[in-house]
Amino acid sequence: MKKLIFVLVVILLGISAVLFYNFNRGITGTTPANAPWTPARLQIPAIRVDASVMGVGQTATGLMDAPVSKVYNSPYWSSVFWYDVGAAPGQSGNAVIAGHVNRAGGDPAVFWSLGKLQPGDRVTVVTKEGRVINYMVNRVVRFPANYPGQDAINAVFGPATGNHLNLITCSGVWTGSGYEERLVVFTTQIG
């Protein structure tokens, strides 16, 4: 029980640091749906992903939201989720987009093959206004889901110089209540 409380405190501290950072940059709250940098599509040719983007905020516990459904054909399985509390693609900092690895029942979802990406692969975001933003994969990392550590939380959500897009999905072994790892693909804007 003490370990669980410690993990929750560490996660909340990490999220608090991100919120504090974003507040100081003037990016708190959700981004208006009509903002020119709002992402509409995510395209990853190497793994045949062409998905619509949904903006999400935080859960009641302060974590990034990732809606789920028990319906097999729900758009939640074929769409990705942009963390609209943080940076948007094309802005300075770490923009974050998550997607499910599998659907209810275990069949593949949008990020089923995310772990196959390699450094040099291209990732593209198309904004609602049609702006095309290209990224190149730098590295693919797996973090423990239950205790990612402050360095991992900062690497994904924290402040950064340059324009980055971090893609997240579940990975590893299913434990009965979730996956044991989080797979993160770190990219940097190019062009």
Image (cartoon, rainbow, N blue to C red):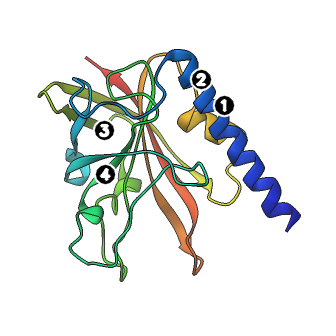
Residue at the disc numbered 2 = 21
The amino acid at mark 2 is Tyr
Secondary structure at badge 3 equals loop
The amino acid at mark 4 is Val
Which residue is at the front of the view, 184 or 121? Answer: 184
Label 4 to label 3, Cα distance in Å?
Answer: 18 Å
Secondary structure at badge 1 equals helix
The amino acid at mark 3 is Asp
Which residue is at the front of the view, 89 or 172? Answer: 89
Mark found first going from the N terminus, 4 or 3: 4
Q: Tell me what residue is drawn at x 42 percent, y 57 percent.
A: 66
Mark found first going from the N terminus, 1 or 3: 1
Q: Position of residue 136 (x, y in %)?
A: 33, 31
Relative to 58, is 35 above or below?
A: above
The amino acid at mark 1 is Ala
**Foreground tag (4 vs 2):** 2
Label 4 to label 1, Cα distance in Å?
Answer: 24 Å
**Foreground tag (4 vs 1):** 1
Crowd band around label 2 with a 10 angstrom C-alpha radius: few (<14), some (14–19), many (20+): some
Residue 17 is marked as 1
Residue at the disc numbered 4 = 80
**Foreground tag (3 vs 2):** 2
Q: Tell me what residue is drawn at x 46 percent, y 53 percent.
A: 65
Which quadrant is home to the N terminus?
bottom right
Which residue is at the front of the view, 172 or 93? Answer: 93
Q: Tell me what residue is drawn at x 61 percent, y 54 percent.
A: 61
